[in-house]
Image (cartoon, rainbow, N blue to C red):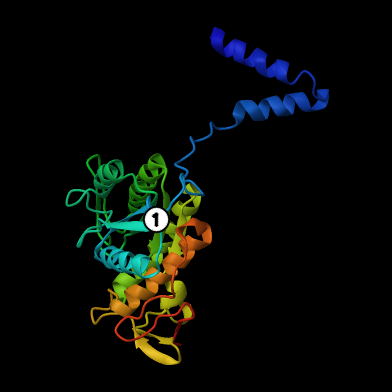
Amino acid sequence: MRLAALSLVALLAGCAGADPGARAQDLGAMLSAPARAPAGPRLPAAPRRAFGAADPARILVIGDSLGQGFGQFLDRQVTARGLAARVTNRARVSTGLARSDFYDWPAEFAVAAAALAPDIVVAHFGANDMQTVIRAEARAVFGTPAWEAAYRAQIRAILATAAEAGAMLWWIGPAPDGNANLNRHLARINPIFADEAATAGAAYFPLADFTAGENGAFLRAIEIDGRAVTIRTADGSHFNAAGYTLVADRLIDAMLARIPALRPGPAPAAVAGLAVPAGARALQ
């Protein structure tokens, strides 16, 4: 009671120099305002250290089987373009953020981040997350109001670990899928990824911007140098070599825009006999 009284006195003292007609209104607003929620994780907007050939940037890739493909070709293109970076690919098939009972990505990422001290993290999730979110403390059935909150909590756990490691992070927004149900799911969670990334200061990297058709329609092929080039596999979910290379080069371009010290090298390498230029566009 004494503490509450002292707090009120302090508030009144703070208003003493203000206009008398405003004091009561200001004091009432201060007393009735809800407590502010603690700030969430904030990722750095620039690298924490200098890079060079002798001490390259450490890039860690996490996520599902699509993330595994992105990591493989990101490693390839980082080398082809002569960047001062080294890629470690820890993405894992059949995993996601929903089923921590099968593979606990927040926990596994925390271990990897502590061991590898990444400067940059690349994350891709979502394709295996059209199911109940299961965590040690609770579960949220897919399609219920609680599901989104639980899924956001998993995303925030990844972002918080990256922030604690001092790493910049690029969150890849999944491309449209050839399966109608999965495509609807990905369309629902992409805005969640974008929102959480923006809140934490991460870079959201949507694949639909250059791999999808009109209104985000799924496309198996896009136009490259005036020719139709297939970029997706027959399963309608994964990319082929040309598609993974396209994504890797666009991702590298996005990184170079924020981190010039990565040093751009030669033009992107050809894959399967086809150059994959930055000007590739979706076929309509």
| Residue at x 22% of width, y 41% of height | 136
Where residue 67 sits, quadrant-wise, is: bottom left
* Residue at screen point 35% across, 44% down: 157
Estimate the x, y position of residue 87 in percent, counting from the top left. Answer: 31, 58
Looking at this view, name the residue that lies furthest to the front: 54
Q: Which of 53 and 207 is in front in this view?
A: 53
Task: Say above or below: 114 vs 69.
Answer: above
Disc 1 element: loop
- Left of 190 or right of it: where is 115? left
Residue at image x 37%, y 57%?
85
Q: From the viewer's perspective, is 156 left or right of 20?
A: left
Q: Can residue 10 be seen in this view?
A: yes
Q: Can residue 178 be seen in this view?
A: no
Which amino acid lies under the numbered mark 1 shown in the image of this protein? Ala
Classify 278 as above or below 120. Answer: below
> Which is more toward the observer, 13 or 275?
275
Task: Measuring from the top left, give residue 261's x and y in whole percent.
Answer: 49, 56
Residue at image mark 1: 53
